[in-house]
Amino acid sequence: MIRVRFVSIPVANQDRALAFYTEKLGFEVVTDQPFGNGQRWIELRPPGSETLVVLFTPPGMENRIGGYQNVAFTCEDVEAAYRELSARGVEFVQPARRAEWGGMEAIFKDSEGNVFVLAAPQGAP
């Protein structure tokens, strides 16, 4: 069966992004090694996830940094995560709220200006 191994998040500064994802979001470093062109291949694991997050920007794709990303994160309690992450200094552009689709969601930015949705699983309060 096919599964998603990793999703790549474009970043301008790998050190700054690594600190954000590990210290503020609590992701675990799986791999951090040289990858050429002055970059590193950094794989992170969100708590409880099989899918990894890679902090890497392929040459010529720098224009993807700092916009809305097609990656959505999930947690059981968006309101609690919103409070906890806000206290850690994560910038939310939309606080936790009930979305039009019926579930809870919040929208946050990472250290590189990338924007992500944080949503509860389907059917969660």
Image: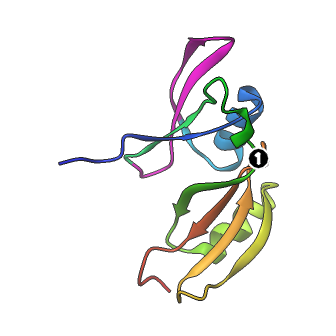
Q: Is residue 123 left or right of residue 70?
A: left
What's the amino acid at mark 1? Answer: Gly
Q: Position of residue 32 (x, y in %)?
A: 55, 21
**Residue lying at the far left of the rendered structure:** 1
Q: Position of residue 82 (x, y in %)?
A: 70, 69
Q: Position of residue 65 (x, y in %)?
A: 73, 41
Which residue is nearer to you in this view: 15 or 71?
A: 71
Which residue is nearer to you in this view: 59 or 19?
A: 59
Q: Report the predominant secondary structure element of the magenta stretch.
A: strand
Looking at the image, residue 73 lies above or below residue 36: below
Residue placed at 79% from the left, 48% from the top? 113
Q: Mark 1 highlights which residue?
A: 66
Residue placed at 70% from the left, 35% from the top? 11
Looking at the image, residue 57 lies above or below residue 90: above
Image quarter for residue 106? bottom right
**Label 1 neighbour load within 10 Å: few <14, some 14-19, many 20+:** some
Looking at the image, residue 57 lies above or below residue 102: above
Which residue is nearer to you in this view: 101 or 30?
A: 101
Please count the marks in the image.
1
Q: Position of residue 55 (x, y in %)?
A: 61, 33
Residue placed at 70% from the left, 67% from the top? 107
Q: Is residue 52 left or right of residue 55?
A: left
The stretch of residues the image draws in magenta is 29-49
Looking at the image, residue 100 lies above or below residue 115: below
Q: Is 42 contained in the magenta span?
A: yes
Image quarter for residue 98? bottom right
Residue placed at 55% from the left, 15% from the top? 33
Which residue is nearer to you in this view: 63 or 110?
A: 63
Q: Is residue 91 left or right of residue 85?
A: right
**Residue lying at the far front of the rendered structure:** 60
Image quarter for residue 60? top right
The kind of secondary structure element at disc 1 is loop
